[in-house]
């Protein structure tokens, strides 16, 4: 232990509490206080009411349907062009994009409903 550390320990244990020690204590305790404050707010998240969000979730669902259908269309067109150019590897990769677009169309509403807890029709 160096001399400065012994001096600080002696000052802390001597019973005097200076402004500098108060600042050091506040700097040491501040992160823990922030964590406790945010964890309290995180536990309160179940009280948020999503009843007014149905319209917004329907918009997001429609966007997922539109995005999925556009992805299917574009990937299918590129797959046809790649197959016509006899590039089988790229053609099958584009067909995989069609499958992903179909998954977005088929499961999009379920993903949105599970994220919010709302039944989106």
Image (spheres, rainbow, N blue to C red):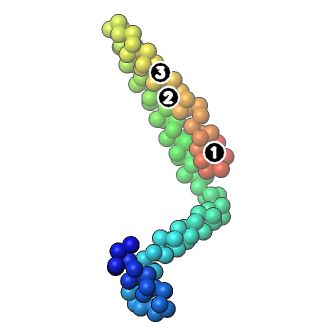
Residue ID for mark 2: 101
Residue 16 is situated, as x and y percent measured from the top left of the image, at 46, 93
Where residue 96 is drawn, which disc sits there? 3
In the rendered image of this protein, does residue 34 appear above or below residue 104?
below
Horizontal side of 26 relative to 48 (left or right) equals: left
Crowd around label 3: few <14 · some 14–19 · many ≥20 (10 Å): some
- Seen at 53% across and 68% down, the residue is 35
State how far apart marks 2 and 3 are (Cα): 9 Å
Question: Depth check: 40 or 26 in front?
Answer: 26
Instruction: Check if mark 2's residue and mark 1's residue have beta carbons within 8 Å.
Output: no
Horizontal side of 104 relative to 94 (left or right) equals: right
Q: Earlier in the sequence, mark 2 or mark 1?
A: 2
Q: Earlier in the sequence, mark 1 or mark 3?
A: 3
Residue ID for mark 1: 114
In the rendered image of this protein, does residue 78 appear above or below residue 64?
above
Crowd around label 1: few <14 · some 14–19 · many ≥20 (10 Å): few
């Amino acid at each position: 232990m160096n001399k400065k550390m012994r001096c600080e320990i002696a000052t802390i244990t001597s019973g005097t509490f200076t402004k500098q020690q108060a600042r050091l204590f506040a700097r040491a305790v501040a992160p823990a206080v922030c964590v406790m404050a945010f964890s309290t707010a995180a536990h309160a998240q179940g009280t948020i009411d999503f009843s007014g969000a149905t319209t917004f979730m329907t918009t997001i669902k429609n966007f997922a349907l539109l995005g999925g259908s556009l992805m299917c269309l574009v990937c299918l067109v590129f797959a046809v062009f790649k197959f016509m150019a006899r590039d089988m590897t790229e053609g099958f990769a584009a067909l995989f994009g069609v499958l992903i677009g179909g998954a977005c169309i088929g499961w999009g509403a379920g993903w949105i409903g599970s994220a919010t807890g709302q039944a989106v029709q």
